[in-house]
Amino acid sequence: MKILVCCGSGLGSSFMMEMNIKKALAEMGVEGEVSHCDLSSAAGNKSDIYVGTRDIAMELTGLGGVVVSLSNMIDKEEMKEKLAAAIREVQAKA
Amino acid sequence: MLQEYVGEGSILLHQSCKDWEEAVTRGCAPLIKARLADPSYAEAIKANHRAMPYMVIAPGIMLAHARPECGAHGVGLTLMTLAHPLPFGSEENDPVSLVITLATPDDKSHVKMLEALTDFLMNGAAREKFLAAKTVHEALAALGEAERV
């Protein structure tokens, strides 16, 4: 499972989300490779799941993966819930 | 430890700003004064925000930053609370009452600071205490609280 977190500059919010997603995956017992980048590099970085805050997420549709749109980046429950749903979707496709 | 990164004058409390642009300018000022960023860094953040308000990362919170090549020279952080919450153009997370401004000279140097900042932001009680702080002393105590958890 490859998860790519994107933000506008690739060093603030995406980095922060990457840390939280890694913790969430560990808690959920899911193995995954999580990385982050800026929006312009996202297309060249094929992934199963793309994560971004709402404005960013709109730009991530059409890249071929499942898109997770987060409105509150520091809400652990929102993140876990949406991430779990995306993982199920990827697994169903496989 | 988030306090490690909060230099003198980089906690600004109950600031009155007329709009988000003034808030960004003020949040950058301590970083510029400490020579961690150029004056142009504030303009780069504003341009970022005008393009897309994604830096309003959670209800009431903006994480203001730009790329290192936009004039950031060192790792630094400013934490600023607003006297009156302001609209920042974010559909879901307005109005903003906490503006965090960060600088990093490259893609990696700020990792530890970001980890500490994440711990603080995800600690609701510490965050509320920080927002209510009237003195720098109280604000620092709120940051310290986030760490003990």
Image (cartoon, coloured by chain):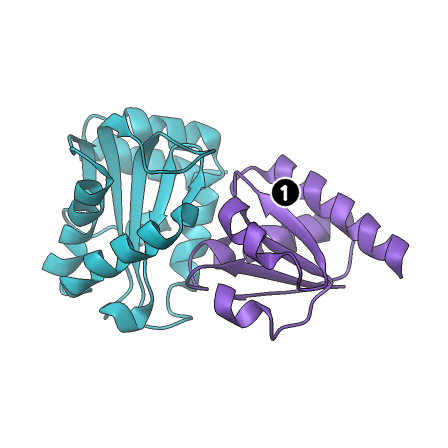
Chain colours: A purple, B cyan
Q: Residues within 10 Å of mark 1 (few under 14, many from 20)?
A: many
What SS does tag 1 mark?
Answer: helix
- Is residue B64 something one can see in this rendering? no
- Is residue B13 something one can see in this rendering? yes
**Residue assigned mark 1:** A79
For image coordinates 57% across by 43% down, the residue present is: A70
Task: Say if A58 sits above or below B103 in the image.
Answer: above
Drawn side of residue B140 relative to residue B52, left or right: left
The residue type indicated by label 1 comes to Met
Residue A68 location (% of width, % of height) = 65, 49
Drawn side of residue A40 relative to residue B96, left or right: right
Find residue B13 and report its image quarter. Answer: top left
For image coordinates 20% across by 36% down, the residue present is: B19
Residue B120 location (% of width, % of height) = 42, 41
Find residue B133 and report its image quarter. Answer: top left
Residue farthest to the front?
A: A62
Front one among A43 and A26: A43
For image coordinates 52% across by 53% down, the residue present is: A56
Task: Say if B112 sits above or below B138 in the image.
Answer: below
Residue A76 location (% of width, % of height) = 60, 39
Front one among B119 and A66: A66
